[in-house]
């Protein structure tokens, strides 16, 4: 059968992701700092966007956005001026402006004014003395910089400095050397003995024991440091042979093997516990990330009020400063039209985002009211479908809204995703949320006798006494998620 080309007409339906819809979805899933950064970036790139509080601050009175649109759409406005004056129609968020629409009413409506946007500005005089250069905050010194500064002040030699720099680059975040001496020697073309010698010298730098290969070597170097050596031979014996027993707190085995009294083992263990198993700890601290809530839930009398946090978000509106630059030039008109559409869609998308966050928060408040009244132990099971059906939105929209969004409540600050949990069945009453069960496990562990901590099976029995039906493996999983060690590792005898 011969192949041939022909044209056919077919009708089909498909979902088209317009640029405006993509922008709305993108804004919906942004965190608060990311949204602020995006708005600031748009303010820099789009000349038709401006902050509302800046209007009228210049020497000349700025042209309104209505006048700007008049200049762009002069033919349409001339025709409209012949018609009788009518009241401005209400502009809905979901409407898409079309050519020839009432741009005057639309431009006035295109303004995003946060309810509590900050307007504080610097009031210092120009002649006031600023902070000195020494008082200016700068970045913290890294571990590599701290070590190489010491290497250059020590007697390492030119070749030794190069090898030492490579060793420093091979350190893990905890301060351990991640490559063996033979590996380093082969890569750099030097002897293994030279690498071992340099590793020993680096281990004596500050912080002590940096560059150790394992925990035993790390503790051994600290115990034998020339400036403050540990004289107790039992401490050295435990480090050399009994770290595994120390990990599970099997002090009796250490006492039997060393022939020492149990009290002496306890004292030696205290010395070892005072050492640092992570030499690079001080240089691995990350800068704290401060959370600003997107929405507040405040109790007023017997009711809870949901309030959007617009503090710090720029007050957006469409500027009219480019009227004189439009003129009759077609390219200028096209550019202004494009920038105006971009500004309008940005403002509309932010408005829609903020309204959706409030709607989702109010729905969560309705389902989890007992949590806001009495605390985390009264959190109820909740899934995305419940909220989606309540506010008549898709589950994916609810998922985007609850990602990286935080709410300030009488019980503290929580991510909106915190309130969605699977259910744990109870013998009496309604099901309990998994987070509530975790909170109960944490409280039981906090109240236990440290000399005789609860095993996972014992925790299961205690929870069952409270009517919570849960398996031992689930308790173990929740305990690990809470960052709690097993009962053997939690036991404290001194």
Image (cartoon, rainbow, N blue to C red):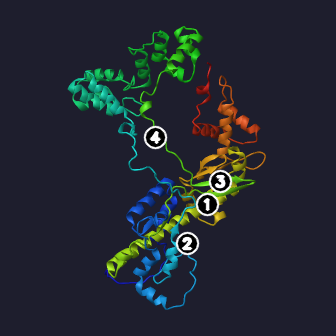
Residue farthest to the right, as pictured: 428
Q: Is residue 475 visible?
A: yes
Q: Quadrant of residue 401?
A: bottom right
Label 2–label 1 contact, CB within 8 A = no
Q: Say left or right for 144 vs 366.
A: left
Q: Is residue 1 visible?
A: no
Q: CA distance from mark 4 to mark 1?
A: 30 Å
Q: How many marks?
A: 4
Q: CA distance from mark 2 to mark 1?
A: 16 Å
Label 1–label 3 contact, CB within 8 A = no
Are there few (<14), some (14-19), or many (20+) residues within 10 Å of tag 4?
few
Q: Quadrant of residue 447?
A: top right
Q: CA distance from mark 4 to mark 3?
A: 28 Å
The C terminus sits in image quarter: top right
Q: CA distance from mark 3 to mark 2?
A: 25 Å
Residue 181 is situated, as x and y percent measured from the top left of the image, at 30, 26
Residue 214 is situated, as x and y percent measured from the top left of the image, at 41, 25
Which residue lies at the image location 46% right of the left edge and 25% below the top edge?
A: 277
Which residue lies at the image location 65% right of the left edge and 22% below the top edge?
A: 451
| Residue marked by disc 2 | 93
Q: CA distance from mark 4 to mark 2?
A: 39 Å
Is 86 above or below relative to 469?
Answer: below
Secondary structure type for disc 2? loop
Secondary structure type for disc 1? helix
Are there few (<14), some (14-19), or many (20+) residues within 10 Å of tag 1?
some
| Residue marked by disc 1 | 358
Secondary structure type for disc 4? loop
Which sits in the foreground, 35 or 113?
113
Give the number of the disc on residue 297: 3
Q: CA distance from mark 1 to mark 3?
A: 10 Å
């Amino acid at each position: 059968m011969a192949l041939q080309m022909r044209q056919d007409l077919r009708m089909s339906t498909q979902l088209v992701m317009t640029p405006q819809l993509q922008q709305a979805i993108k804004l919906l899933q942004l965190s608060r700092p990311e949204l602020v950064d995006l708005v600031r970036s748009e303010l820099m790139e789009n000349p038709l966007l401006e902050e509302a509080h800046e209007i009228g601050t210049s020497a000349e009175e700025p042209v309104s956005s209505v006048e700007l649109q008049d200049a762009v759409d002069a033919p349409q406005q001339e025709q409209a001026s012949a018609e009788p004056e009518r009241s401005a129609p209400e502009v809905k968020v979901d409407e898409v402006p079309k050519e020839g629409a009432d741009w005057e009413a639309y431009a006035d409506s295109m303004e995003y004014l946060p309810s509590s946007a900050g307007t504080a500005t610097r009031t210092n005089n120009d002649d006031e003395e600023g902070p000195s250069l020494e008082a200016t905050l700068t970045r913290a010194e890294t571990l590599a910089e701290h070590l190489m500064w010491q290497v250059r002040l020590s007697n390492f030699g030119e070749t030794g400095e190069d090898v030492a720099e490579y060793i420093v680059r091979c350190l893990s975040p905890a301060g351990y050397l991640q490559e063996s001496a033979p590996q380093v020697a082969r890569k750099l073309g030097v002897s293994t003995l030279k690498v071992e010698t340099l590793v020993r010298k680096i281990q004596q730098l500050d912080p002590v024991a940096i560059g150790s290969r394992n925990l035993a070597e790390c503790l051994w170097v600290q115990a034998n440091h020339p400036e403050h050596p540990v004289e107790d031979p039992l401490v050295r014996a435990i480090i050399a042979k009994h770290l595994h027993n120390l990990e599970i707190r099997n002090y009796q085995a250490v006492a039997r093997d060393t022939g020492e009294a149990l009290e002496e083992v306890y004292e030696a263990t205290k010395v070892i516990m005072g050492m640092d198993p992570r030499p690079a700890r001080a240089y691995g601290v990350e800068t704290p990330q401060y959370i600003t809530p997107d929405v507040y839930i405040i109790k007023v009398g017997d009711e809870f009020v949901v309030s959007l946090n617009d503090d710090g978000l720029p007050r957006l509106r469409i500027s009219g400063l480019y009227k004189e630059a439009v003129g009759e030039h077609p390219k200028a008109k096209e550019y202004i039209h494009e920038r105006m559409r971009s500004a309008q869609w940005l403002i509309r998308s932010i408005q829609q985002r903020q309204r959706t966050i409030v709607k989702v928060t109010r729905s969560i408040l309705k389902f989890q009211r007992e949590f806001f009244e009495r605390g985390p132990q009264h959190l109820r099971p909740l899934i995305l479908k419940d909220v989606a059906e309540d506010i008549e939105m898709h589950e994916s929209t609810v998922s985007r809204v609850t990602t990286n969004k935080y709410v300030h409540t009488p019980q503290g600050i929580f991510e909106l995703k915190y309130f969605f949990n699977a259910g744990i069945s109870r013998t009496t009453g309604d099901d309990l949320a998994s987070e509530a069960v975790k909170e109960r496990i944490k409280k039981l562990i906090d109240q236990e006798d440290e000399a005789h901590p609860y095993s996972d099976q014992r925790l299961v029995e205690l929870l069952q006494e409270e009517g919570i039906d849960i398996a031992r493996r689930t308790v173990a999983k929740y305990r690990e998620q809470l960052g709690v060690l097993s009962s053997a590792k939690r036991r404290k005898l001194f």
